[in-house]
Image (spheres, grey):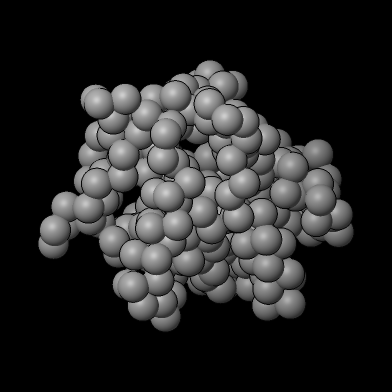
Amino acid sequence: MRIVLIEDNRMLARAVSQSLRQEGHSVDWLEDGLDGAAFLSSQGADLAIVDINLPRRSGLQVVRDMVVGGADIPVLMLTARDGLDDRIAGLDAGADDYVAKPFEMAELCARVRALGRRRGRKPQMTETFGALSYERPGRRLVGPQGALDLPRREMALWEVLFDNAGRVVPKSGICDSIYGTGADVEMNAVELLVSRLRRKLRGCGVTIRAIRGLGYILQEDEAA
């Protein structure tokens, strides 16, 4: 998933970002509410993790602005406040879940996975495409010969292509989804990643087509 983290505690933000990236997500980190709100409005996200106590604009106001703007982005509120009134205020503002500091990183990652399962166009626990079965909760992709061994970035690539199956995904969009917006990554790194995933998907009834000058599209293989 492409996650936006809005948190002004730099040490905590780095730790959260590292843990989420190890889970295979891309993370864009903003340090204040005004910049975070602008980023979400212009770039969007699959999930937002928002602290309540932020400089320039509170996390509650960021979430309210998202709701008013019609943004369909799950929100996990992250804050040191743990009183009942604060939890209610966060949820009433439009947050989907709430974690109070201090917290265990494993719990945060589990809550992120839970929110991730609620999003998307297909609610099924197991989704099929070609001869593949994709178990989204466990991030497990199974082909005719069994489970595919996909490192986290190949799995992230599969997810962004699968979530946009039948539509062209620009290289820049793939790069943003996997590495984060503005990451200093050469486009040939994306090409190599696509090449590795394409080899592993052979015989699975799907094709990753390169559309010159545009990007890549995941399609079911009509010849399969």
The part of the image, by quadrant, that contains residue 110 is top right
Residue 37, percent from left and from top: 43, 60
The part of the image, by quadrant, that contains residue 20 is bottom right
Q: In the image, is 60 to the left or to the right of 12?
A: left
Q: Quadrant of the C terminus?
A: top left
Residue 194, percent from left and from top: 38, 56
Please tell me whether residue 175 is drawn above or below residue 1 in the rendered image. Answer: below
The part of the image, by quadrant, that contains residue 120 is top left
> Closest to the observer: 15 or 215?
215
> Closest to the observer: 203 or 138?
203
Please tell me whether residue 96 is drawn above or below residue 81 in the rendered image. Answer: above
* Outermost residue toward the bottom in this view: 184
Residue 91, percent from left and from top: 63, 36
Residue at 53%, 48% (x, y): give it: 155
Residue at 68%, 68% (x, y): give it: 18
Please tell me whether residue 119 is drawn above or below residue 33 in the rendered image. Answer: above
Residue at 73%, 56% (x, y): give it: 79
* Outermost residue toward the top in this view: 124
Tell me if residue 219 can be seen. Answer: yes
> Closest to the observer: 68 or 216?
216
